[in-house]
Amino acid sequence: MDAKVNWSNYLEHATLSDLGMRRGSNQDASASVLAPDEQSWRRRGHVFMVADGMGAHAAGELASQLAVEGVPFSYHKMPDAPPPDAIRKSVREVNQQINRRGEANAEFRGMGTTASVLVVLPQGALVAHVGDSRVYRLRKSTLEQLTFDHSLVWEMSAAGQIAKEDLPQFVPKNIITRSLGPHAEVQVDLEGPYPTEPGDTFLLCSDGLTGQLKDEEIGAILGSLPPDEAARVLVDLANLRGGPDNITVIIVRVVGNPPGSGAAEPLAVTEDLSELRAQKLMRVVMLSFAAVCLVAAIVLFSLEFRIPALVSVAAAVVLFALGMLQSGSSAEPQLRYLRPGATLGKGPHVRVECPPGEAFVGDLRKLVDQLRDAATEGNWSLDWSKFNSYSRQAETAAEQRNYAQAVRDYARALRAMMTELRNQRLKGKKAEPEDGESLIGR
């Protein structure tokens, strides 16, 4: 079957990337690749990706662009491989391409990029991830972060079982521990598949968004507005709070069950070869240490140091046992099928309830009031009609405790104001502060 499908009957999606308020170039990149027909959907699904580049000059821009062009292309070039294998291999191949480009040119050396990929399949949503860009899923009023941040803060928290908010203030929050490009090999996280149902909303975003908005705020906006409006409001909120970084968002909402969703075969996946190699190396190390301990025990016995010798023997036994538990050198990658309900990875990594509530409505009201005051004091040349109309509607909805509607109307008031500011700038009128300045007080 090679039937064309009107995907808008099943899926809504919106993409928006913004320079931010303090950057001179946009090092973020994104890709949205819908299946061309039903057969492609059943085999490979839809692919969405966000990449946040790093590096001096144009290096970050190049790295992120190579990523979003290369990963979907490579993924679709492996039609016979199971989707989890294909997407993981694609990310690794692109990592090597970026690494080679960086090594070949001194200006690009060390360049890198994050990579967060969402593949929407009949079996559910599959995520491949490297870095600290994120993938979320909103189901009803619950927002789940499906990806683990490969950042110093998250890694230290996971290693020490310490809550991220309890880490010392001097620990930098913007240092990432894993990215595409700096090294020839990279470990790729796979998460899912997470079964989808109508109403599920996925968000892919760079840290220019998550650095400025709380998860609860993100979830309330996603749940209150259609994807195109939500994308614009999220970016506007990040910019209103200073916009220190580039901001990129992709919002994907499931609105119906596409063909083949109910009768999809279980996903197959091959065991990760990198994990097998790591296990093999660990076995060699442990068996080597066991041999060293055994030799030490023999020497200690010969010198009549019996207690240290017995300790060395015990250590040798423990190390030998641990080593034998690791995969042996003859281990071969095995294809296996995920049982119903089983997922790869350890996600979701964060889960928060975020129904539109009185507190968030109050924050939005305060933001709207600050914008109004700033515009009045600055004599901005604006058409106030939409802004005032949405503000009044929001106040009425809040008084009636219809917080979902209040969030929608306040968000639309903010969007109307920001649209006016952008239009005035295009006309060459002074209607807002210069880049790098905050539009309102924090």
Image (spheres, grey):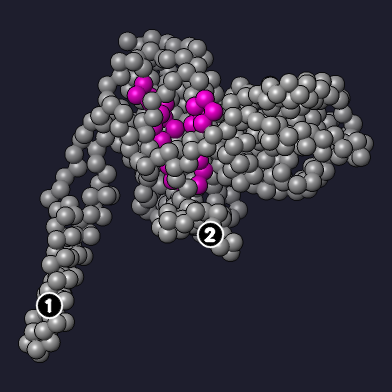
User: Which disc is residue 310 wearing?
Assistant: 1
Q: Where residue 250 sits: x, y (%)?
A: 55, 31
Q: Name the residue under label 2.
A: 167
Assess whether residue 132 is covered by the magenta stretch. yes
Question: Label 2 is placed on what type of residue?
Answer: Leu
Above or below for 101 versus 206: below
Magenta highlight range: 118-142
Dot 2 falls on a residue whose secondary structure is loop
Q: In which quarter of the image is residue 117?
A: top left
* Residue at x-position 34% and y-position 24%: 123
- Quadrant of image for the N terminus: top left
Instruction: Give the residue displayed 38% in from the left and 9% down from the top.
Output: 3
Neighbours of disc 2 within 10 Å: few (<14), some (14-19), many (20+)? some
Q: Is residue 375 at least partly visible in the picture?
A: yes
- The residue located at (49%, 27%) in the rendering is 139
Q: Is residue 380 left or right of residue 403?
A: right
Residue 265 lies in what quarter of the image?
Answer: top left
Residue 377 lies left or right of residue 29; in this view the side is right
Q: Is mark 1 on a helix, strand or loop?
A: helix
Q: Earlier in the sequence, mark 1 or mark 2?
A: 2
Does residue 65 appear anywhere in the picture?
no
Residue at 70 percent of width and 23 percent of height: 401
SS assignment for the magenta stretch, majority: strand
Q: Where is residue 434 in the image (x, y as percent from the top left)?
A: 81, 45
Q: Does the segment drawn in magenta span residue 19?
A: no
